[in-house]
Structures are given as structure tokens and as C-alpha cells.
Image (cartoon, rainbow, N blue to C red):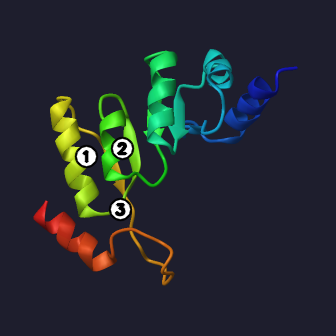
């Protein structure tokens, strides 16, 4: 039996119609990702920009790549030409760099805002008041 196929089949049977699976492929080799692709998986998540770029170059172009980790401004240029969704926009400076690199590639890049609601210093993101102001000013 194929473990990747079995896991995908089991997961697909357990989720409602319309729910999409983002297969976290970080640290997995291209061959493993290709195998999941061959069994129908099309959405993958990576947390390292340069590793994502390398995998993008080697794998089918219809893969929907999501960036799921902390993204540094100086790494945006590596993924801007092809990334489908950035899950972790956590500050205005990063947003400006994403906009700049998206424009340079004649694209718009959807992003999810990271909001800091915890009282933990180690956590990041927009503070709720910052987020409200940010969204109000567009």
C-alpha cells in the first residue's frame, strides 16, 4: 500500500465537501511532493522562501503554493512571481514589500493578516488597534 495515497484518501473522506487540504511539504523532498501530486493533491504549503522557489522550479506549474511561515521582507522577491497565498502578513513593512514585488511581477498576491491577540511577547502580528487602522486606511 502507498502511505501517501492512503493518508490522502482517508483525509478526503473525513472532511466536508468544499474544504481544501493544504499539504505542508516543508522538509519533504520533491519526489514525495510529486507523489502526492500524482494522487491528486494540488495545494502545498512551505515555510522557507528559498526552498519553496527551488520546489516550484522542479514541480508541475499548476500547484497552488501557499507560504505558511514567518516571511522576511528580503525573501518576498523569491516567491512573488508564483505564490498563490501568503498566510502570515504580520506588519506593514512586509505588506509594502509584498505589494512592491507583486507589482514588479504584474500580480496581486492575496495575504492573510496575522493578528496578535495573545499576551505573549514571543508572538507576532498586527495589534488589534493597528489592524483596524490599517484596514480603515486601505
Label 2 residue SS:
helix
Position of residue 92 relative to residue 52, above or below, is below
Cα–Cα gap, marks 3 and 1: 12 Å
Are dots 2 and 3 in contact, CB under 8 Å?
Answer: no
Number of the front mark, 2 or 1: 2
Q: Estimate the x, y position of residue 41 in percent, counting from the top left.
A: 59, 25
Q: What residue did someone put label 1 on?
A: 98
Q: Quadrant of residue 21?
A: top right
Q: Determine whether, in the image, residue 123 is placed left or right of residue 127.
A: right
Near mark 1 (Cα within 10 A), the count class, few <14, some 14-19 or many ≥20, is many
Q: What residue did someone put label 2 on?
A: 75
Q: Determine whether, in the image, residue 87 is placed left or right of residue 19.
A: left
Label 1 residue SS:
helix
Which residue is depicted at the point 52% across and 31% down?
Answer: 43
Q: For residue 18, say whether it is visible.
A: no
Which residue is depicted at the point 39% across and 62% down?
Answer: 114
Number of the front mark, 2 or 3: 2
Residue nearer the viewer, 11 or 74: 74
Cα–Cα gap, marks 2 and 1: 10 Å
Amino acid at each position: 500500500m502507498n502511505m501517501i495515497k492512503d493518508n490522502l484518501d482517508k483525509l478526503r473522506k473525513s472532511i466536508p465537501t468544499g474544504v481544501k487540504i493544504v499539504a505542508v511539504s516543508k522538509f519533504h523532498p520533491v519526489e514525495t511532493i510529486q507523489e502526492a501530486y500524482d494522487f491528486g493533491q494540488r495545494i502545498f504549503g512551505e515555510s522557507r522562501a528559498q526552498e519553496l522557489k527551488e520546489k516550484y522550479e522542479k514541480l508541475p506549474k499548476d500547484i497552488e503554493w501557499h507560504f505558511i511561515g514567518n516571511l522576511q521582507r528580503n525573501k518576498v522577491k523569491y516567491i512573488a512571481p508564483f505564490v498563490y497565498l501568503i498566510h502570515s502578513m504580520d506588519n506593514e513593512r512586509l505588506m509594502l514589500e509584498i505589494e512592491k514585488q507583486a507589482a514588479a511581477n504584474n500580480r496581486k498576491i492575496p495575504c492573510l493578516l496575522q493578528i496578535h491577540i495573545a499576551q505573549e511577547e514571543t508572538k507576532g502580528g498586527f495589534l488589534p488597534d493597528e489592524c483596524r487602522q490599517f484596514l480603515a486606511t486601505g
